[in-house]
Image (cartoon, helix red, strand yellow):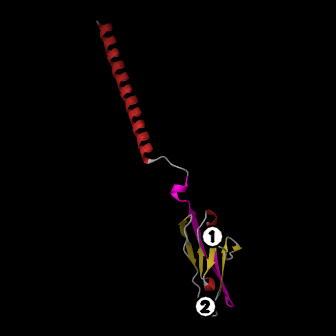
Amino acid sequence: MEDRNVVVGETVALQCKALGSPPPRITWLKGEEPLRPSDRHYFTPGNQLLVIGSTTLEDAGRYTCVMSNTLGTERAHCQLNVYQRFEDCAPFSSPSTVTVGIIVIAVVTSIVVTSLVWVCIIYQTRKKSEECSVNT
């Protein structure tokens, strides 16, 4: 079984491929708890496919497919990751706000650097001027 990534509200299908003689009985676990059919959890005949409709953040977790027959039991695992839609998340700054912020920072930085350069030039000029007046 492969790990899956889905967005909240999407439908996801987890597949458990099991062959054997006698045919294996398949059950599904989320974490360590057995999954039962519900209004959002569906099983195909034979339970080889688990379909989760309208996923929620609570659906995220480790899913286990337990395959058993008279010869033994095997398990297959997958991780289901459920992510929130971008627009559902806390609002971020719009690109125009970010751009304006970057421009403001650049302008302020330029002014500070330019001011420091002028302070250095004035300091050097006064220092030379004082040296010249002391020597004469």
Location of residue 110 in the rendering, given as x and y in whole percent from the top left corner: 37, 32
Q: Residue furthest right?
A: 33
Give amino acid for label 2: Gly
Q: Give the quadrant of the N terminus.
A: bottom right
Taking the magenta stretch, the answer to whether it contains residue 18 is no
Give the residue drawn at x 55%, y 56%.
88
Q: Amino acid type of disc 1?
A: Arg
Q: Is residue 69 magenta?
A: yes
Reply above or below: 136 against 87.
above
* Residue that appears at 41% across and 32% down: 108
Which sits earlier in the primary sequence, circle 1 or circle 2?
2
Establish if 27 lies above or below 113.
below
The foreground one among 126 and 111 is 111
- Residue to which mark 1 is pinned: 62
Q: Nearer the viewer, residue 84 or 24?
A: 84
- Give the SS element for disc 2: loop
Question: Where is residue 103 shown, x and y percent of the image?
Answer: 39, 39
Image quadrant where one finds the C terminus: top left
Tell me what residue is drawn at x 56 percent, y 59 percent.
84
Residue 80 versus residue 103 in the image, above or below? below
Q: CA distance from mark 1 to mark 2?
A: 25 Å
Q: Which residues are magenta?
A: 64-89
Write down the residue under mark 2.
Answer: 20
Give how far across and how far down residue 42 sits, in percent.
62, 77
Residue 124, above or below 114? above
Residue at the limit of the structure toward the bottom, as seen here: 21
